[in-house]
Image (cartoon, rainbow, N blue to C red):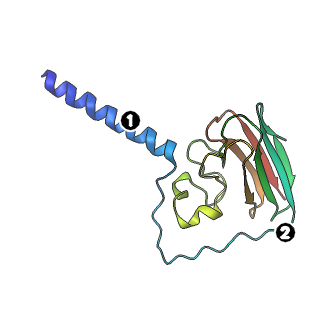
Amino acid sequence: MSKNIYIIIGSVIIIVLGGFLFFQSGDAPEQSSPEVSISPLVGNGESITIRYTDSGYVPKEVTISQGTEVIFENENNFFMWPATAIHPTHTIYPGSSIRKCGGAEKVRIFDACQAIAQQGSWSFIFQDQGSWGYHDHLQARFTGKIIVE
């Protein structure tokens, strides 16, 4: 009887650990056809910078035109990972999902798909109009909003 309990406990630990590693790694891409050609995002030439500081994103909310590039600059002592809400799946911005981080569609999703070191940056061109919440995947309490008109 006790042998069965150890097997059950071991199985639960493996399942929980596997799920944790899957969501933390961001390296589990959604399957896509190698023949799919992803066109680059087209900008309007405008850009705005959001700084990541010890107190989170500054400014916390911005309003931009469609096609504007938003640059996330890391001025914090810790890594940042900007991504569309909802943590941890990153699915609010149209077409985005953390599962696409390892695939060809990576360039079209609002997700850095990796940690950005201090003094590093990552940018995204917003094509879809709407109000888009985002967060730091590594410290999800740091959030912001981008309104695209």
What residue is shown with label 1? 16
Residue positioned most to the top = 2
Real-space Cα distance between discs 1 and 2? Answer: 44 Å
Above or below: residue 117 compared with residue 129: above
Q: Are the residues flagged by discs 1 and 2 in contact, CB closer than 8 Å?
A: no
* Residue 111 image offset from top left, x and y in percent: 64, 53
Residue positioned most to the front = 119
Badge 2: few (under 14), some or many (20 or more) residues near its Cα, within 10 Å? few
Residue at point 75%, 44% (across, down): 119
* Residue 109 image offset from top left, x and y in percent: 64, 59
What residue is shown with label 2? 44
Badge 1: few (under 14), some or many (20 or more) residues near its Cα, within 10 Å? few
Residue at point 85%, 54% (across, down): 48
Residue at point 66%, 48% (across, down): 83
Three-letter amino acid code of the residue under disc 2: Asn
Q: Is residue 106 left or right of residue 7?
A: right
